[in-house]
Amino acid sequence: MNVASPSALIRLLGVTKVYGQGPAAFKALDGVDLQVQAGEFVAVMGPSGSGKSTAMNILGCLDTPTAGEYRFRGVRVDQLDRDARARLRRHHFGFVFQGFNLLARTSALENVELPLLYRGESAAARHALAREALASVGLQGWEGHTPGELSGGQQQRVAIARAIVTRPTVLLADEPTGNLDTQRGREIMALLVDLNHSRGITVLMVTHEPEMAAFAGRIVRFVDGRVADDRPNGAPTDTASAEAKPATTDADAGTGAAGPVVADLPEAC
């Protein structure tokens, strides 16, 4: 268990989440304490119904706790209004899902541009940043292909490019290898590790697969809405044989230090 650190990038303090009321109430999270330092790669595991996905939804500002505190760079996220949480989500978080969630009739380039469209970026900026993101995941030359023309591994790379095109501080990945075979899964994991190492992106990944969790530097296990185990992974899986194209290490590619300072988060995030 990590020692509490007030300087942690992310902190959950006594977080509880209850769905429903009265006799039908269900406590999905029960007093969760969790902290994540900038630049960590954390795998979150646990059986179905353990609360791990609920915790990730709260971390990604997709849901709010019933009780307790959620702090991001020291700011009380649980006290922000809906619009401020949306700004925080747009500027600091990238999301990768098991089902890829790509628009079927839309090119890879256009899929990756979507988060930039929501942020109001110009067409020229969207095109340039989306091409850069696709190149960084090994898909240069595939910009015009639709999801139906790509393999499962390639579709997940497009989804990762879409998640990192905004240069997020944190990447939240929910079962990112769940729809892939073992080799493609290892390649995606090697890519996530490279993004973590070369860009300093903090990665939190939900997975049921011990082989994929082994790539992380730390493994947190949830049981019955609580953190049952939290320990470093002393020997993360070596990614050298996993054939992932390295992400760009250009200093302008975005790191955990990017984005507004703590005092400006509610207004400028």
Image: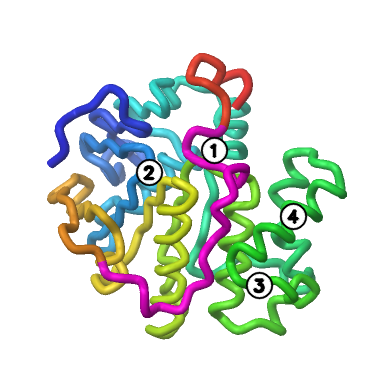
The residues tagged by marks 2 and 4 sit, at their Cα atoms, a distance apart of 25 Å
| Quadrant position of residue 86 | top right
Badge 3 or badge 2: first in the primary sequence: 2
Seen at 81% across and 55% down, the residue is 127
Q: Which residue is mark 1?
A: 92
| Quadrant position of residue 158 | bottom right
Q: Which residue is mark 4?
A: 113
Determine whether the residue tagged by mark 3 lies in a helix, strand or loop. Answer: loop
Residue closest to the far right: 123
Can you tell which of label 2 and label 1 is closer to the viewer? 2
Q: Which residue is mark 2?
A: 39
Determine whether the residue tagged by mark 4 lies in a helix, strand or loop. Answer: helix
Residue range (magenta): 237-258
Q: Residues within 10 Å of mark 1 (few under 14, many from 20)?
A: many
Can you tell which of label 2 and label 4 is closer to the viewer? 2
The residues tagged by marks 4 and 3 sit, at their Cα atoms, a distance apart of 14 Å
Cβ–Cβ under 8 Å for marks 4 and 3: no
Q: Which residue is mark 3?
A: 139
Seen at 49% across and 49% down, the residue is 199
Characterize the magenta stretch by its predominant secondary structure: loop
Q: Could you say which is closer to the camera, residue 121 or residue 19?
A: 121
Q: Is residue 190 above or below residue 145?
A: above
